[in-house]
Amino acid sequence: MSATPEPARVVHLLAPAFSGATWFSLMLGAHSEVFGTGELYKIFDWERPSCTVHGEGCPFWGGFEECARSDLLSRIAARSGRSTILVTNSRKQLDGVSVLSPDVQVRYLWLVRDGRAVTASMLRKQAVSGMSAAVNDWARAIRKHQRFLRTIASEDHLTLRYEDAVEDPTAMLGRVCAFLGLEFEPAMLRFWEHPQHYIGGNRGTLLSMLRQRGDDTAPVLISSEQASVFDWQKDLEYYRSVDVTDRFVDHRWMTELSAWQKLVFRVRAGRQNRRLGY
């Protein structure tokens, strides 16, 4: 029996929570040579893939009953027929699971977003206990990624800003494609027209994609566990109003954060945010 063919390229997307990774992954995953897995690390917790878009009936992940195997990425490449596999925030988990040959390129994309927008999202979704904790979590994630990327050759990683994608997604995707050695495909901008089999991810972003297709009742709508954490319906109502062709413009932090909260951020992480260009 012949060996399972390996992907030509594995791309790790690194991004602090609530930084736009789902939207970016959906766009890049709509490329004809790219398969976006989403948060692949979750399958090791769940012991089987669970597609947020299709649920248990997913036509792609339904064939992956056994997940914790060294050839996982090769199996994904073979099943998808794509040469590039994009995974989100799953680097550490895959380091000990997937053994790739030296011929497989490994590249890193670091997606950042204004820390004030990120902390506002954390507070809105009650992911932290207060503003100080939100700022600390964001700053810690930024430092962690910076430390890791210092160990990677400069030609193997690329820093991206969420706001640049919102301003000009064509230019941003063109830059990413050039970095990865891919041809830019305008179809990426209409990612909702392409099959997506996304694990984890931002429910609001995925809901907006499904709404564009005329279906916002798919399994993407939240588990009972998530529903107990905060008022998802309020947040999902916002995403129901978002047109994905409008590039997920989201300035809610400007009015949601109080003057005191903005001061806390400026004191604790203002310099760090400015170094990222904000």
Image (cartoon, rainbow, N blue to C red):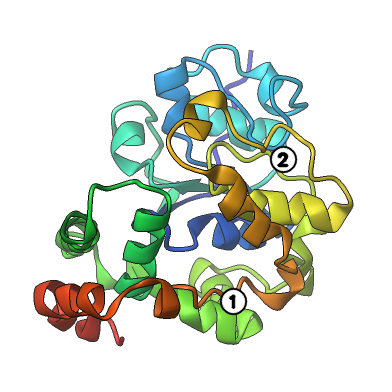
Discs 2/1, front = 1
- Residue 185 in percent (x, y) is at 74, 71
- Residue 133 in percent (x, y) is at 18, 54
Residue type pointed to by label 1: Val
Label placed on residue 21: none
Instruction: From the image, tell me which residue sits under label 2.
Output: 81
In the displayed orientation, state which residue is furthest to the right. 214
User: Looking at this view, is 197 or 264 the one in front?
Assistant: 264
Q: Quick one: label 2 or label 1, which is nearer the N terminus?
A: 2
In the displayed orientation, state which residue is furthest to the left. 267
Camera sees residue 174: yes
**Is 71 located above or below residue 152 in the figure?**
above
Residue type pointed to by label 2: Gly
User: Looking at this view, is 232 or 148 the one in front?
Assistant: 232
| SS type, badge 2 | loop
Looking at the rendering, in which quadrant would you find the N terminus?
Answer: top right
**Is 158 located above or below residue 44 in the figure?**
below
- Within 10 Å of the Cα at label 2, are there few (<14), some (14-19), or many (20+) other Cα atoms? some
| SS type, badge 1 | loop
Instruction: From the image, tell me which residue sits under label 1.
Output: 249
